[in-house]
Amino acid sequence: MSRLISIIIPSRSMKDDISGLLDDISRQRTDFITETIRITGVAPVARARNDGAKQAKGDILIFIDCDIRLGNEFYLANLVKLLDRDKTLGAVCASLRLPPDASGFQRLYARQIAHYEMPIVGEETFVDMVPSACFAISREFFLKIGLFDEKIIRGEDSELSFRIKKAGARMVLAPQAWCYHPAPDNLGQLAGINFRNGKGVCFVDSFYPKLNVDVHPQGILYASQKITLAGRIKRFAIATCRALVEFKVLALLARFFYVGGYLWGLVSYRMLKRR
């Protein structure tokens, strides 16, 4: 019997069109078979991914967000072969890139937002975290370290990566493995995404501060860490000033809405004690 690999795709509703992604998966060149598990309408997304993992029958889990498109027909094989070859690896991720048909607004956003895109590498490259949008992990190891923390509504991949490192495992960016991840296409989407990010971080700060792991401003190739709220505010302020000096309008707007989401969270989670 052929080996089975499980692909887990969380989505908010059945209205999310994943036909392109499913077509990409069907075109993959592999020496294994795949099962695709779509989890719809489950929140937070950490719980959706965990539900998929619990249903999975494959020995390797590949998490892919519903708005992702695969970069080439060797995407799955490139992730799996690294996990097979090196048992010291905890997880393997792919580079996130803008789609080839990205709009001018999306390209400007990606240029102004730090580490929005990741380079396509030619060799196995150490990373400090794996983005939950596209990564592979052995099912046995994922269950061993305790799955995604379902208390986190935003940034669950950073916290999982912290536990992967704590378990003594390494994480790498696979060579010649990339996927396309769209950026916000207009100001409304920019506002919504960054507002939700700020609110999600405030939620963790308010109820589970020990779980908040700060991603390095220069990206996943650099060490992430747990730093104090004061330290994060200082780093945020410095980056905002730099964006102001360099006149990065979209970066400034993103930070404005992020702060708005965080302040909304302070009112909702701390003053009104809502969850």
Image: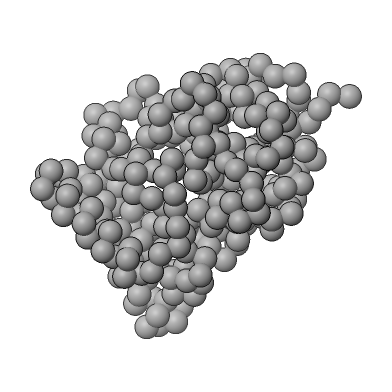
Q: Position of residue 115 (x, y in %)?
A: 35, 40
Pick the quarter of the image with the N terminus. top right
Q: Quick check: 91 above or below 122?
A: below
The residue positioned 44% from the left and 53% from the top of the image is: 224
Residue 85 or 186: which is nearer the viewer? 85
Residue occupying image coordinates x 72% and y 30%: 84
Q: Quadrant of residue 24?
A: top right
Left or right, 107 with reference to 173: left
* Residue with the most extreme right position: 1
Residue 192 coordinates in the image, percent (x, y): 34, 53
**What residue appears at the point 54 percent right and 28 percent down from the top-left corner?**
124
Q: Quadrant of residue 82?
A: top right
| Residue 32 vertical placement versus 260 (above, below) | above
Q: Give the color scheme: rainbow, by chain, secondary structure or one colour.
A: one colour
Observer able to see residue 38: no
Taking 109 as reference, is 265 left or right?
right
Q: Position of residue 190 (x, y in %)?
A: 30, 47
Q: Is residue 4 visible?
A: yes
Q: Position of residue 129 (x, y in %)?
A: 51, 46
Which residue shows up at 38% across the image and 50% down it?
Answer: 216
Task: Using the rendered view, name the quadrant where residue 237 is placed.
Answer: bottom left
Number of residue marks: 0
| Residue 13 placement, left or right of 3 | left
